[in-house]
Image (cartoon, rainbow, N blue to C red):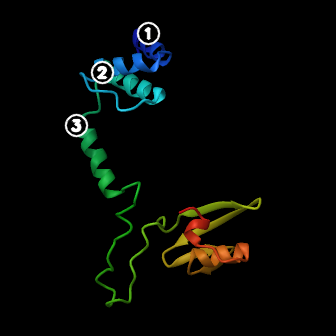
């Protein structure tokens, strides 16, 4: 990064909000600033300044990113959690997987009364302390001795 660009970015960091918003409008061709958060605006402006100087992400890279997002949706893992039962399952025998659950193999961790709990998500249930449970609620009851909603207890 050139010394001028770096200096400009560091000067931006110290500007008051109204001047950051004005600079945002200049850099983004008259668009109003989408936020009143100074750090957010500073980062957006800094990225745009660097993009203008060095060029942005190529169309090929953007296309590859979009393909990977569709294939491995990092937020909802849709590729791993189909909504409907598969064709191999007889009617009403196979339940679709709850979308609140992480993909199988994920380890859910929670601190409870100073103890670190680790629950491994399986294809059909959960593993806790080398025992298999059908639901998170059963594990929460085992740990606390009281009835808890498993999703709430593990913050899912």
Label for residue 59?
A: 3
Residue 90, percent from left and from top: 32, 90
CB under 8 Å between discs 1 and 3: no
User: Label 2: how many residues lie within 10 Å, few (<14), some (14-19) or many (20+)?
Assistant: some
| Label tally | 3
Q: How far apart are marks 1 and 2 (CA)?
A: 24 Å
Q: Distance between the residues labelled 3 and 2?
A: 25 Å
Q: Quadrant of residue 119?
A: bottom right
CB under 8 Å between discs 3 and 2: no
Q: Which of marks 1 and 2 is nearer the N terminus?
A: 1
Q: Name the residue under label 1.
A: 3
- Name the secondary structure under disc 1: helix
Label for residue 146?
A: none
Label for residue 25?
A: 2
In this image, 25 relative to 2: left or right?
left
Quadrant in which the N terminus is drawn: top left
Q: In which quarter of the image is residue 149?
A: bottom right
- Asked if 104 appears above or below 146 in the picture, the reply is above
- Asked if 59 appears above or below 54 in the picture, the reply is below
The residue lying at 55 percent from left, 68 percent from top is 151
- Asked if 83 appears above or below 114 in the picture, the reply is below
The residue lying at 28 percent from left, 39 percent from top is 61
């Amino acid at each position: 990064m050139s010394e001028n660009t770096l200096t400009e970015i560091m000067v931006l960091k110290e500007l008051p909000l109204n001047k950051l918003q004005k600079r945002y409008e200049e850099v983004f061709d008259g668009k109003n600033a989408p936020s009143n958060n100074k750090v957010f605006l500073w980062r957006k402006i800094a990225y745009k300044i660097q993009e203008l100087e060095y060029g942005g992400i190529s169309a090929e890279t953007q296309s590859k990113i979009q393909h990977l997002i569709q294939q491995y949706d990092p937020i909802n893992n849709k590729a791993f959690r189909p909504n409907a039962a598969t064709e191999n399952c007889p009617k009403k025998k196979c339940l679709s997987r709850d979308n609140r659950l992480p993909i199988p193999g994920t380890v859910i961790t929670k601190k409870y009364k100073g103890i670190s709990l680790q629950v491994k998500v399986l294809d059909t249930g959960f593993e806790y302390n080398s025992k298999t449970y059908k639901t998170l609620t059963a594990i929460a009851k085992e740990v606390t001795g009281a009835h808890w909603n498993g999703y709430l207890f593990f913050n899912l």
